[in-house]
Amino acid sequence: MYAFGMTTTPRRSPESASTKVKRTVSIDPDVIDQLVGTANLSALVNELLHEEAARRERRAALAGLLGELENAVGPADETLVAHYAAQLR
Amino acid sequence: MSTIVFDCEPLNTLIRQESKLSELKKVQALLVAASAQDADLVVPAAVIAELYRGTHAAGVDTWLNRHRAWLIQDTTRELARVVGKLLDSAGRGSEDHVDGCVVASAIVAGGGTIVTGDSRDISTIAAGNAALTVVSL
């Protein structure tokens, strides 16, 4: 495993360069081997973490919406859930 | 992780005040299934443009601001290229631009499920793409 300093920021904004924080992460060597030549690894990691943070926000928003729907129309019809689950890919 | 791309009708069902209970229960079940599979929910910007039509734009804004569960797929040059190719291949014109955006959004996501109120046009545009499944509510 490789360890290196990583900068992260809670959100991207003009002032974010001055608000970045340093963290240390460990990465599998085969991944690092594939990223040889990457000009700014911190920027890449920052971008990927932004995507993950946004994904988690969307998950939380979906959980909130499902809660509202349950309050409005009752619990989900399990037969329908199974019907749609079988069709999702 | 799977991707589910939404056409207008499922979102309209959620946003409209006067949606039928049976329609809401279908969308609810779909979202429960999507949540259980940790799916990414995507809506093309072109679909949101359709939602804004009519007199309830403010209600759409309020709803979208409150429920940020969807990743909005902008109409980028990359997406536009895919849309153009899809419509051309299907022999469709600009009137099917939104449907083209829905199918293209699923393609650029690497495949997935398209949820729509009327699968006929979407299925025609998506025809032959094995990475896509079209689900009609």
Image: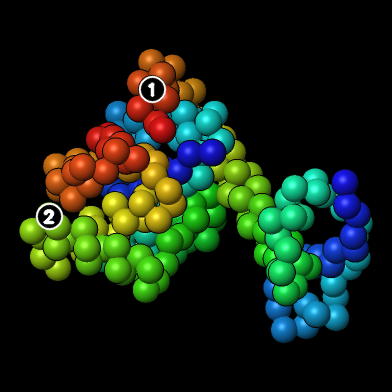
Disc number placed over residue A86 in the picture, else none? 1
**Residue occupied by mark 2:** B90
User: Quick one: SS at disc 1?
Assistant: loop
The C terminus of chain A: image quadrant: top left
Quadrant in the picture for residue B118: top left
Q: Chain of mark 2?
A: B
The scheme the figure's colours follow is rainbow
What kind of residue is marked 1?
Ala
The vertical placement of B82 against B12, above or below, is below
Whether residue B133 can be seen here: yes
Quadrant in the picture for residue B30: top left
- Return the residue nearer the eye: B1 or A41: A41
Quadrant in the picture for residue B88: bottom left
Q: Chain of mark 1?
A: A
Q: Residue at the location (73% across, 63% down)?
A: A36
User: Label 2, label 1: how many angstroms apart (C-alpha)?
Assistant: 28 Å
Q: Residue at the location (39% across, 41% down)?
A: B112
Left or right placement of residue B91 versus residue A59 in this view: left
Do tag 2 and tag 1 residues touch (Cβ < 8 Å)?
no
